[in-house]
């Protein structure tokens, strides 16, 4: 089994490039038929989803717009995670269909906060497209419209996802060896 070293940890191959692309195409095709005539705004959440977004969006054949946002979670005084905008969204989303493009939904708290923030800007509809979901770790209720893979609670890296900011450039997805 192919393995890689990222910083101080070893990872083994988990999802090949071929498997990833197959699922990305499946999700793109669902979006193409569901959102035809809506001219959705794809909101790409940096940094982790840049590769997923590049592959997904090149399979989108309906008219659409693409915007970027960078958020960071931080621990407030309460137990709920809060999210702040590092790179904000300046375009209006009022009355629009928005598709959030995310790399991974783990506990779901980042997504929950992001949804709250975006709802205040009065979009017509918000949908979530996530490359990966760790359902066993989810701590909030989320309606995830489009997802490529449900995975176990293992730490993974590659295809945009990092470990200590490294490993994003790996073509495949790797799972930590513990
Ligand atoms: P959540 O708020 O717990 O859902 O966290 C989501 C964020 O945690 C993602 O956007 C990633 O940046 C990061 N994350 C969660 N799991 C992993 C992983 O297995 N590898 C790399 N980053 C991860
Ligand atoms: Mg992320």
Image: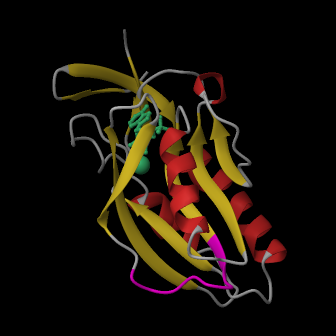
At 58% from the left and 24% from the top, the residue drawn is 137
In this figure, what is the number of numbered marks? 0
At 76% from the left and 76% from the top, the residue drawn is 32
Q: Which residue extends farthest left?
A: 7
Q: Which residue extends farthest front?
A: 77
Q: Is residue 17 visible?
A: no
Q: Which residues are magenta?
A: 90-98
Image quadrant in which the C terminus is located: top left
Nearest the viewer among 109 and 4 is 109
Nearest the viewer among 37 and 149 is 37
Q: Which residue extends farthest right?
A: 33
User: Which SS does the magenta portion mostly show?
Assistant: loop
In the drawing, does residue 18 fall left or right of residue 48?
Answer: right
Q: Choose top left, top right, bottom left or bottom right for residue 152.
A: top right
Residue 168 in the image, given as x and y percentages of width and height: 30, 47
In the drawing, does residue 153 fall left or right of residue 128?
Answer: left
Q: Which residue extends farthest top?
A: 178
Vertical side of 166 occupied by 84: above or below: below
Vertical side of 7 occupied by 108: above or below: below
At 78% from the left and 78% from the top, the residue drawn is 35
Say whether residue 19 is magenta.
Answer: no
Say whether residue 94 is magenta.
Answer: yes
Vertical side of 30 occupied by 173: above or below: above
Residue 145 in the image, given as x and y percentages of width and height: 74, 55
Q: Is residue 158 visible?
A: yes
Vertical side of 131 occupied by 85: above or below: below
Nearest the viewer among 12 and 140 is 140
Residue 25 in the image, given as x and y percentages of width and height: 67, 62
In the drawing, does residue 6 fall left or right of residue 123?
Answer: left
Residue 117 in the image, given as x and y percentages of width and height: 51, 62
Q: Choose top left, top right, bottom left or bottom right for residue 89.
A: bottom left
Nearest the viewer among 46 and 89 is 89
């Amino acid at each position: 089994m192919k393995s890689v070293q990222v910083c101080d940890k070893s990872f083994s191959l988990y999802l090949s490039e071929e498997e990833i692309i197959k699922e990305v195409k499946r999700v793109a095709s669902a979006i193409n038929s569901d959102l035809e005539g809506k001219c959705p705004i794809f909101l790409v959440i940096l940094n982790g989803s840049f590769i997923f977004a590049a592959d997904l969006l090149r399979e989108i054949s309906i008219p659409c717009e693409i915007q970027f946002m960078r958020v960071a979670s931080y621990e407030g005084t309460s137990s709920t995670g809060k999210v702040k905008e590092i790179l904000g969204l300046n375009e209006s989303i009022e009355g629009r269909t928005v598709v959030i493009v995310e790399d991974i939904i783990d506990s779901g708290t980042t997504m929950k906060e992001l949804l709250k923030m975006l709802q205040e800007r009065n979009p017509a509809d918000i949908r979530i497209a996530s490359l990966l979901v760790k359902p066993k770790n989810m701590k909030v209720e989320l309606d995830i419209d489009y997802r490529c893979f449900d995975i176990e609670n293992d730490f993974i890296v590659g295809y945009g996802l990092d470990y200590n900011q490294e490993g994003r450039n790996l073509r495949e997805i790797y799972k930590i060896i513990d």
